[in-house]
Image (tube, rainbow, N blue to C red):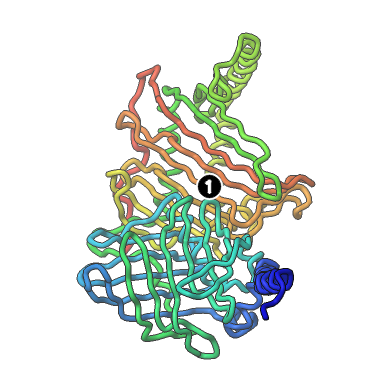
Amino acid sequence: MSDPPDKQIRVAIARLFVPLVLLLAGSSICFAQSPQKIVDDYLRAEGGARALGKIQSLTIAGSLRDTSSDATGSYSLITKAPNKLYSEIVIEPQHSIAAYNGKSAWGQDFNGAPHTLTGSDAVKWEAVSRYLNGHLVDPKKDKLDEKFVDVENVDGRQAYRLEISLAPGVMREVFFDVQTHLIVRETLMQGADAAEEIDYFDYKPTSGFLEPSRIELHEGGQDYEITVTRVEINGPVQDSLFDFPAADDHPLPDIAQLLRDVNKNQKAVDEIVRQYTCHLTETDERQNSDGRLSARSVKEYDLFYVGENGEPARHLIAKGGKPLDGEEEKKEDERFSKEFDEKKKKAAELENDPKKQAKQDEEDQAQISDFLRAENFTNPRRELFRGQEVIVFDFGPNPNYKPKKLVESIVQKLVGVIWVDEQARNIVRLEARFSDNAKIGGGILASISKGSNLVFEQDLVNNEVWLPSYAEVHASARIVFVKGRQDEIDRFSDYKKFSSESKLEIATPVDSEPKQ
């Protein structure tokens, strides 16, 4: 005899209800995971946070196959603490390289020559190097921001998906196996695009850690299968491996002397800069301590250079894409006229007072001297930048110099790369970032956070003088008790010459003593 209808309904509901409860329970377990717990489980599975924190170098090497062409080659990934990276794919005779040496990033494309990476590409590889060397042991120290997203299926494996922000515009999606807690996939995001995706398989014990024995790499529209043949932890790795490859066919000038020449030549540059005016667009964004945008403004100026030292004076002409209205325009004209006259008067005083001018020249010279004392200059090379041959070199703190002035202590925390036009003796581009926190007044008055960075570029105008074309600053700072982040981009355009009294003369000879 069959069960009464009401009992059949209760049984059906029970059959549906029990799996649903189990599913929801399982889901609640997954979604209850915090980013820190996911990372802690990973660190334990990998060999322990303390042991991972002692890794100073890691070498992964293997054989490689391009799945589209069936061509074979080799793969290498080498890291060295705290922030060096070398990645190479070789399919003879072609090499693809991405590297970061702790100061600058460089790369080599298939069929291309080595070149220094700039802009977002440089930011990306600095961030990736910091991430890979940190092993997620101390995300806060490595400036990593973690966010749990969801649970996804990765090649049949359930995995927690974390979004880890490495730097502005650079994020790494990391997928942790729910069962083993090991990383099964990483996707490097640059803006909204996936720069590369890496899948990891078949982890095996290696020197007390677990490392994948098979990797699938997807980048640049290519798919590679990698069989890991060697993993070496804390083996000897020379710093020179990460440096831009040296070329012996063209001697390089002494870098310190080159910078002194640049400083001396600035007087000639200032003389001709006074003959130009340009348009400046300033975009300013400010963020709260939690990273949310608090304010954004776009202002446009007419820019003039005043006096013998080319002091800039800005005349505001538009805000938010709209010209100033009548009353705003009148007030700005009055303000600008006053500022211009004051700077012109100060410039005249300097020109008419040799002692004041000599003191100003001494201060200018001291600034470059501060830089030369506080920094080391390494890895010089010749490259093309926008079709122009330039000298490129890295700079970083000089550990043997003890700062005697505030400016030296701040400068000594900068690392980066400089491009110099050897013939014109002018800086073409500069990228710099703070490798440590910089404090003013012992940190009570102000401090600039580690990772704050800037970019500065110049263009050759009228084939006679290098003038600013682009400046970018990303600073996380605290002034007194107010903390926040500022992102500013300045774009210089439409240079016009309103005087033609002189031509720029190079103040120093080009044939300075070469570096052997």
Q: Position of residue 260 (x, y in %)?
A: 44, 48
**Nearest to the observer: residue 178 or residue 138:** 178
Residue in the picture at 27% in, 71% down: 66
How many labels sit on residues? 1
**Nearest to the observer: residue 72 or residue 399:** 72
> Is residue 25 at all visible to an observer of this figure?
no
Q: Position of residue 371 (x, y in %)?
A: 53, 52
Q: Is residue 32 left or right of residue 312?
A: right
Residue in the picture at 39% in, 86% down: 230
Residue in the picture at 68% in, 48% down: 477
Residue in the picture at 50% in, 25% down: 305
> Is residue 100 at all visible to an observer of this figure?
yes
Q: Position of residue 398 (x, y in %)?
A: 54, 63
Question: In the picture shown, does residue 254 fall above or below 260?
Answer: below
Within 10 angstroms of label 1, few (less than 14), some, or many (20 or more) residues?
some
Question: In the picture shown, does residue 354 fall above or below 166?
Answer: above
Q: Quadrant of the C terminus?
A: bottom left
**Nearest to the observer: residue 242 or residue 52:** 52
Q: Is residue 150 left or right of residue 274?
A: right
Q: What's the residue type where badge 1 is placed?
A: Leu
Secondary structure of the residue carrying tag 1 is strand
In this view, the residue farthest toward the front is 1
Quarter of the image holding residue 338?
top right
Q: Position of residue 428 (x, y in %)?
A: 39, 43
Q: Quadrant of the N terminus?
A: bottom right
Report which residue position mark 1 lands on. 454
